[in-house]
Structures are given as structure tokens and as C-alpha cells.
Image: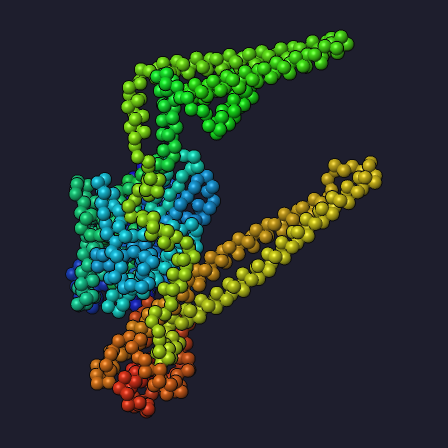
Amino acid sequence: MVKETIRVYARVKPLGRQQQAGIYSVDDDEKSLSSLEIIVPHDLADGFVNNKRESYKFKFQKIFDQEAKQDVVFDSIAKPVAECVLAGYNGTIFAYGQTGSGKTFTITGGAERYSDRGIIPRTLSYIFHQLQKDSSKVYTTHVSYLEIYNECGYDLLDPRHEASRLEDLPKVTVMEDPDQNIHLKNLSLQQATNEEEALNLLFLGDTNRMIAETPMNQASTRSHCIFTIHVSSKEPGSATIQHSKLHLVDLAGSERVAKTGVGGHLLTEAKYINLSLHYLEQVIIALAEKKRSHIPYRNSMMTSVLRDSLGGNCMTTMIATLSIDKRNIDESIATCRFAQRVALIKNEAVLNEEIDPRLMIVQLKKEIQELKDELALVTGKQRTSELSQEELLRLDELLETFLEDNDPDSTLDVGADMRKIKYCFIHVKQLMNHSKMNHEKLLSQYIPEEKETNKETGEELKKLKELLQQRDNEINILVNMLKKEKKKAQDALFQLNAVSACSTVLDQSPPINLEESQSPSSCFSLKEAKDFSSSGENASLLHECLKFRGKMSLGCQEAFEVFRQDHADSITIEDNKQLLKQKFAEAKCLGEKLNEVRIKINHLKGEITQRHVQRAALAVSSPSEELNTLDPVEEKLRTQIEEEKKSYKAMFNRMKGLKVEIEHLQLLIEKVKTKLQKDFEVWWSEETIKLQQEKPELVSSPNTMTVYPQFIKSSQHLSTNSFSDTTRVSPNEDPAGKNNSITSSNPTLKTRTPPSSSTSVPLTGDSQADADILAFIKARQNILQKKGKSCQK
Ligand code: ADP
Ligand code: MG
């Protein structure tokens, strides 16, 4: 059992371009805890801190300042927890902080660069590498991905996800068994046998989360997400299985409602978030107070799910993410305060071990058989049935091992079955007769020679006598064994009543369903797992998910093309594509080199064989040559082979690394593409709604792009305009206005004059088609105007 307080770390997000730095300092002491001091300036605009303290100090296990990289964060925070999980303990890492402070960046990672991978992909990679290295145990790994939104749970890995809206999916519900263990109904556990499969599941979940998001429901900042890695391990032959879970939690933004000033639907959401975080806070306060007996876990789904992580059997770590710019000072202080309370909680992690029911059954069956045998012996009710072929073979084997064993104390244990004991006696008798005959034969062979070599035959005779003595000993041992068995049987007579009762019960017990007993946790449905077992299926599902949902009309496609070129994400896609190209080229080059080295090694091997042949020929022609001496040429060839092998291995490992990188990049590109398409849908519907408000008579159905069939016709007029120029928008003027989080590495701007509002467009007279045209023009003008403004600046 390991008893320790929850470890609490802080991470400060780098300042954005337009953010004004707040005043803070980090005192990083290597030996003890680090401390973070936040200074509240007197000139805060809202004035609410003016009469408050000026400086706040908080202690953390370690503080990661703005420049801290993802690998460093992983090494210090997640690696130790992953190691505990591999050793059989439960672990949890959760990120807490206001929206935009870097929770998702820390837990999942950024979508732009491979080096931005967060704790989840790095932990998966680490765990699978460790599992590969350890051949002493058999491991099984599963993952699950739960999203809690407005107090309802959803399975992000549900195969039905692509077809449904979040609200249509079966809800995940919390069930409690009589031992107060929490089970999650409708949450699937997907098996992942390697890193690639697990990463595919992670991306599938992330994509499902993104797709379920609508402008009205920006679930990613308003929902809690829990990615769980389940590891079970067993030593071969042992009946004990270890189970452990690692929860990686991305909590919803912790900001207060009052400040964000939202209303309506968003307010409802904010209330839910604040409520669930409020319940989390209550649980934490209750846990930190030593005398409290009741902890209000049941108040919210999140605290129920994380019950073990917060006050029980778990190694828990919290990361407080801080966005210390001037405007967010009060939120940062609130986050730090929360963290200080969490740091007071003590958890007790225990090894999660249980007995494998299958092996238990085997052991019990054996025991039953032994008891039955003894019973038969004691009651005198001998079994008359013949021994099966298998049993006879097994007896032969036992007997052979016993007879070959030179240890005089060795025993032959065939169980208390008279049929078996008799068989052994008969067998030994046969062996004896056989050896007697051989004896006589030998003797008769030796007699004539005896006359010539008296001394020698004397010795032979002695040996044979010894052999005879040995056989006698063996028979004695067998007789002793029989006596022992009889005594055992007598002892058993005293326990006869108890034993017979027990065996009746065991005989009558129904056969145990192995499949059921293997999966005690009710949340894992075997059928579901089968439906979704192969990683190939998962990959294709992911692919399907990423397909642009709904068909686009030609006009819409054109608008999408313009939007895509102007979108900041297309830079990311292009950058990643370039990187991918480089990686492919590197992989190709490496592949060729690998081939070359392989050919070289084969060639060197061939030379060694040739050398052998030459030396053999030399030995035949001039036998005086010493063949056993070392051949320096061959030695040299062998050293060369060793070196080539080393470089082959190094290249091969690099190739493996490249494969993971390439797969990751491909998934990143797909993810950004999906996001771009979603942003386009949002932007397009916004533009249509705006147009409907301005010219309601022209638009009959202000919905998504799929309701514009006539657009194909009208857009052909427009496509001759100067739309094909590529103009990039800086990330701050993202046309959808949804994308402030993406930072582009090198946005380029072209100067362009905004077109006059009265662009002459041939209208068709058909109100639907005209509405399409106007929607399209309007949308385009909006982009151009925005660009124009930023250029003038
Ligand atoms: P949250 O999940 O807390 O709402 P995000 O993780 O989405 O916040 O972060 C908001 C933005 O800030 C994202 O664009 C993210 O890439 C960026 N970001 C956050 N933390 C860092 C960091 N440590 N380094 C670089 N960029 C970061
Ligand atoms: Mg987030």
C-alpha cells in the first residue's frame, strides 16, 4: 500500500500576442516544493481587487513556466504515474484551469506539431514500450473515452457516434454495486494491442468529440473528458491477475459565470459546469477535513466516476493550468487556491490483485478428483471402469520418470486409485521379468569368457548384482508408497462425512461460464468489444468519420475552396503535409539503406562460407596445415558483419520511430481537415442567417449548405470572378471567428481592395437561386472586408 498526498503541479501558458503579462514569479527550489507568487496590480480595470492583498504565494510540487516543453512535462508528471500503473496501482492525472489555459494542450496535445503531443499519446507510447520489454508477464490493455456534458455521460468511442448527434447516443450511466464499486453502463472498453491501435482510438474519440460540437454547444471547453487506459497482467502459470487503470482527465473550464457574461443556452451549460466543479470542490474540501465521514461523491457524475482517484485507491496528480495575463489574474488565483486544497488530500493506493477464476477452477477440479479417489479407496467402492488411454500414457510417463530418477527418496504419486496402483505394479513386474531375462542372457554369454577373463566377469557380475539390488530397492519403495496411501486413506476415513458433503455440493454446482467469470466488471460488454475489436475497423471508422458529412453543391464547394485557402488551418495542413513528405522521403531513403546493409551482410556471410570451403580444401591437400587455428580473415569478416548489424539495428529502430511519427502526422492532418470543414459549416450557416435577416424575402430555408441545389447553376457566374487568388488571413482574423486558438507559424498577407458592395451579378429570377448567389457574395465580401481592414491597420 502506498499512502501519499495528491501531487499538485502548475503550468503557466505562454502569453498570446495581444496579451498583457501579469506579474508573477516562480521560485524553483530543487529540493523542496516550488512556489509561485502572483502580484495583483492596483490598476485592474474592474477595480475589484483594489482593497485586497497585493501578493499571493502558492506552493506546488513543481512549476512549469511558459517555455516548458511537452516532453519535460510528460517526464516529470506522467511517467511516474504510468510506472505505478504498470506496477498494478491505479493512477489519475487531471488538468484544472480556466478555458484557454492549456488543459487540452497539456493532456491531449496541440494539433500542429508532432512535438506538441500531450500526455495521453506520450503515455500510450511509454506504456506499450514498457510492455514490449517485459516478457515475464502477459498483458492486456483496453481503453475507454468518456465525455461528461451537462451532467450526462457519452461514450466517445461508440461506433454509432458518426451517425448521431451527441444527444441521440445512449447515455453512459453510473451504477454502484453492493461493495460501492462504480461501474459505467454503456461505456465501451476497446482492446488496444499496440500503440497504433490505441492512438487510433484516441483520435477517433477526439474526432467524435469535435463532430458532435455545434456552434450552440462548444462541448470541448464545456465538457469533462476522461480517457482511461486499463492494464491487466498475469504471470504465466499464476492464478493472480493485476488490474490497474490510468484516468487522464481534461476538465471543463473553471471560469466563473459572472465574468463570462453569457446567457441562455450557454448559461445553462455554464451552470452545469460550475455545478459539477463546485461539487468537485465540495468533495475536495470534505476529503481535506480529516474528521468528515460523509463525502458527497454522488452529487455529480464526475465526482462519482473519479471517486477512487480523489479519495481512495489511486495515485493522483493534478496539473493546475494558468493563463497569467493581466485579465486572468483573479481566475489564476482561484485555480491556485483550488490546487492548494487538493494538495491536502491523502490517498492510499493498493495493488489491485485478484485470483484468475479459470486457474482456480483447474485447481479445484484437481482437488475434487483427489478427494473422490480417496473416498473410493476408503469406502471400498472401487471403480470398475477401465483407465482411459490418456491415463495409461500418463502413468507410463510417471513410472518412467520415477524409475529413471536416481534419488532414493523420490516417490511415485499416482493418487489413491487402486486401478492405477495395480497398473503400476503390473508394469514394474513386467519390467522386472524383462530385466531378469536379459540378465540370464547376459550371464550365458559371459560364462565361456569367464574362463578366460575371470577377473573381468567378476566385475560384470558385481555390476549386475548392483542393478538387481537397485531394482529391489525400487520395488521396496513402491510397496512403501502403497502403505503410505493406505494410511492416508485411513486418515481420510475420519473426515469422511465432511468430505462427502463437500463433494456432493461441488458435483451439483452448475458449470461455470468462463466468459462471464473473466469479465466481472459489468461495464464491458463482450458483444460490443467484438463489434469493434479489430483496429482495421477502427481505422476505417475514423476515416468514415472524417468524410465531409452531407453532399455539397458545386457553389458550396467553390465557397469552401475560398474559405479553405483563407483559413489559418490550411497553413497547418500544408506545413504538416510538407513535414509528412520529408518523413516519407526519409523513410524511403532509410529503407534503401537498410536494403543495402542487408545485401552487404549477406555478401559478407557468403565470403565466410567461401573461406570455409577454401580452408577445408587446403586441409585435404596438405593435412599438416592446422585447421583449428583461428583464421584472421574470417575474424575480420565477422567483425564487419557485427558492425553492419549494429548499423542495421540502429536504422531499423529509426525506421520504427519514423513510422509512428508518420502515422501521427497523418492523423493530425485528418483532424485539422475535419475542424476546417466544421468551421466552414458554421461560417456558411451564419452568413445565410445574416442574409436572411437582411433580405428575408429572398431566402426560404436558411439552413446548411445541403439545402441549396440551385446553387450549382448560379455559382457558375461567380466562378469567373477573381476568386482563385490565394489570400491568407492572419489567425486573428479567422473568418469563422471560432478559431482564435490556432496560431499559425508564418501567415502571409496580400494587400487587396475590398470590393464595392454593389457587385453586379446576373440574377436568375429564381428566388432560391438568387438567395444562394447573395449568400455567397455576402460571405465573400465579409472575408475581403476583414482582410482590407487588417491591411489598412
Ligand atoms: P483549454 O483546454 O484549457 O481550454 P487549450 O489547451 O485549448 O486550453 O489551449 C488554448 C490555446 O493555447 C490552444 O491553441 C493551445 O494550442 C495553446 N496553448 C496552451 N498551452 C500552451 C503551451 N504550453 N504552449 C503553447 N501553446 C499552448
Ligand atoms: Mg480544452
Q: Is residue 418 left or right of residue 443?
A: left
* Residue at image location 44% in from the left, 67% down from the top: 576
Confirm whether residue 358 shows in the render.
Answer: yes
View extreme (right): residue: 622
* Depth check, front residue: 576 or 194: 194
Residue 673, x across and y down, in percent: 38, 68
Q: Is residue 61 left or right of residue 415?
A: left
Left or right: where does residue 170 sit relative to residue 720?
A: left
Q: Which residue is located at x 83 percent, y 39 percent? A: 622
Quadrant assignment, res 290: top left
Tell me the quarter of the picture where residue 718 sits: bottom left
**Above or below 765: residue 295:** above
The answer to whether any part of residue 345 appears in the image is no
- Expressed as whole percent of the image width and height from the top left, the position of residue 473 reads 54, 12
Residue 407 location, x and y as percent?
53, 18
Seen from the viewer's position, the closer of residues 89 and 25 is 89
Colouring method of the image: rainbow
x then y, percent, for residue 423: 49, 20
